[in-house]
């Protein structure tokens, strides 16, 4: 999985802006619907009043129409009693009343239809208002979440990305360590064992020929080769997990490491330790040892140095380690850029070890003038700070030139 925190931040901000704009539009729809609802309710009240008045008028007109018809029937049956003018007036009155009654009935029907339409529209508008209120409320919650927790979301994504990169760096560091061990075994112990087989076969042939002098020489050579191979195996084991840390402590183990490094690489080294020797928590001792081991390895690979100076000072609950060389040096600004892109895993590993110990890590380097690495970490002592005789250790730390 690959993502860019800035892009995700931009997407979330755009989503927030769109949400705010949509919320404003929904508010306008809500306000328009409420205004229309108010007009519909007023119109409905007016229509209801007209319906009531029309119904009352229709009821009266039906009574009048009934009377006018009765009058017309009465006049029409008795020609002797009523004149033609009376009959004409009765007929006109009945026709007029019937026409007005029809008009009012149609008006009542129209008003009832209008009332039904208004009631349906009012219900629809009320539902629209309810949905608008619900959507607006939900959008408020989302907008507040996006705007309020934006930094937390970004930080969470950044943490996930850092964990992913850290996991990749750990895997790469493990693979590099496996390659290094495999190369050391292949170039050292495996070659020695193959040579031993050849020497043994040669000794067997000389023994069969009764060339005892040659056999004695080969046995001596084989013994020396076995001794050399054993030293190589011990060195590999020491680099994997220096048991001297458990038995002797940090300072003696570092002193042995520096001496072995000088013997193996022919780079002149100087180790000086100042302060009271004390046992520390195992995790702290192994972390400091790995830090020094990585620093010396970087000097060997990149610095082209002929001398390494290492100072270790223990004072007031703090440990300060300074490792300097006379190598080619480098531009620290460029190295910081490469570290930011995930390169230079050795320096990244050193820095992360120090940060896990709540310490401070600094690199000072000038091209052509060498490099200095400084480490400051708080000391966590063991509860059992005893020497081999069971008494509390009070030995001073001596330096080695």
Image: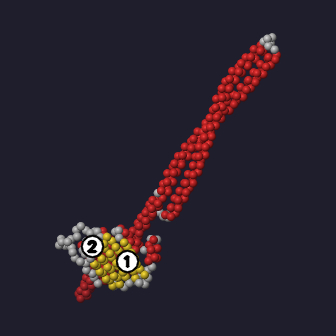
In this view, the residue in front, 31 or 277, is: 31
Q: Nearer the viewer, mark 2 or mark 1?
A: 1
Q: Position of residue 392 (x, y in %)?
A: 20, 72
Using the image as rendered, state which of residue 222 and residue 263 is in the foreground: 263
**Front-most of residues 209 and 282:** 282
Pointer 1: what residue?
373
Mark 1 falls on what kind of element? strand
Q: Is residue 201 above or below residue 350?
A: below
Kindly tell me whether residue 88 is visible in this rendering. Answer: yes
From this viewpoint, is residue 210 visible? Answer: no
When the figure is inspected, residue 52 is found, relative to residue 282, above or below; the finding is above
Which residue does the image show at 53% across and 46% down from the upper left?
134
**Picture disc at residue 245:** 2
Q: Give the x, y percent position of residue 308.
A: 35, 82
**Quarter containing the C terminus:** bottom left
Q: Residue at x 26, y 76 (%)?
A: 275
Query: Helix, strand or loop at disc 2?
Result: helix
Is residue 45 toward the left or the right of residue 245 in the image? right
The crowd level at tag 1 (other Cα within 10 Å; few <14, some 14-19, many 20+) is: some
């Amino acid at each position: 999985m690959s993502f860019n925190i800035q892009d995700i931040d931009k997407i979330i901000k755009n989503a927030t802006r769109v949400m705010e704009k949509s919320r404003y539009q929904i508010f306008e729809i809500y306000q328009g619907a409420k205004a229309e609802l108010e007009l519909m309710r007023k119109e409905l009240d007016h229509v209801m009043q007209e319906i009531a008045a029309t119904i009352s008028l229709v009821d009266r007109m039906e009574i009048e129409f009934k009377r006018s018809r009765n009058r017309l029937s009465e006049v029409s049956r008795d020609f002797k009693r009523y004149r033609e003018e009376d009959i004409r007036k009765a007929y006109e009155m009945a026709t007029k009343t019937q026409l007005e009654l029809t008009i009012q009935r149609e008006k009542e029907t129209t008003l009832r239809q209008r009332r039904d339409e208004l009631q349906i529209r009012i219900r629809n508008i009320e539902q629209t208002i309810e949905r608008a209120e619900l959507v607006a409320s939900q959008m408020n919650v989302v907008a507040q979440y996006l705007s309020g927790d934006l930094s937390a979301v970004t930080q969470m994504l950044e943490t996930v990305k850092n964990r992913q990169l850290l996991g990749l760096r750990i895997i790469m560091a493990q693979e590099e360590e496996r390659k290094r061990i495999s190369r050391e075994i292949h170039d050292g112990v495996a070659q020695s064992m193959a040579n031993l087989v050849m020497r043994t076969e040669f000794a067997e042939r000389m023994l069969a020929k009764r060339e005892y002098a040659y056999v004695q020489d080969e046995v001596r050579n084989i013994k020396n080769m076995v001794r050399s191979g054993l030293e190589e195996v011990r060195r590999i084991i020491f680099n994997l997990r220096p048991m001297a840390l458990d038995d002797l402590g940090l300072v003696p183990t570092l002193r042995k490491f520096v001496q072995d490094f000088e013997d193996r690489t022919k780079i002149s080294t100087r180790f000086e330790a100042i302060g009271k020797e004390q046992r520390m928590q195992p995790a702290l001792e192994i972390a400091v040892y790995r830090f020094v081991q990585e620093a010396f390895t970087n000097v060997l690979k990149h610095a082209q140095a002929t001398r390494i100076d290492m100072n270790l000072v223990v004072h007031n609950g703090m440990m300060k380690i300074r490792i300097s060389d006379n190598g080619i040096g480098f531009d620290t600004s460029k190295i910081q850029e490469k570290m930011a892109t995930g390169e230079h895993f050795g320096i990244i590993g050193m820095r992360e070890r120090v940060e896990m110990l709540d310490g401070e890590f600094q690199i000072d380097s000038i091209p052509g003038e060498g490099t200095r690495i400084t480490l400051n970490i708080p000391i966590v002592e063991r509860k059992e700070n005893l020497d081999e005789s069971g008494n509390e250790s009070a030995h001073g730390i001596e330096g080695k030139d």
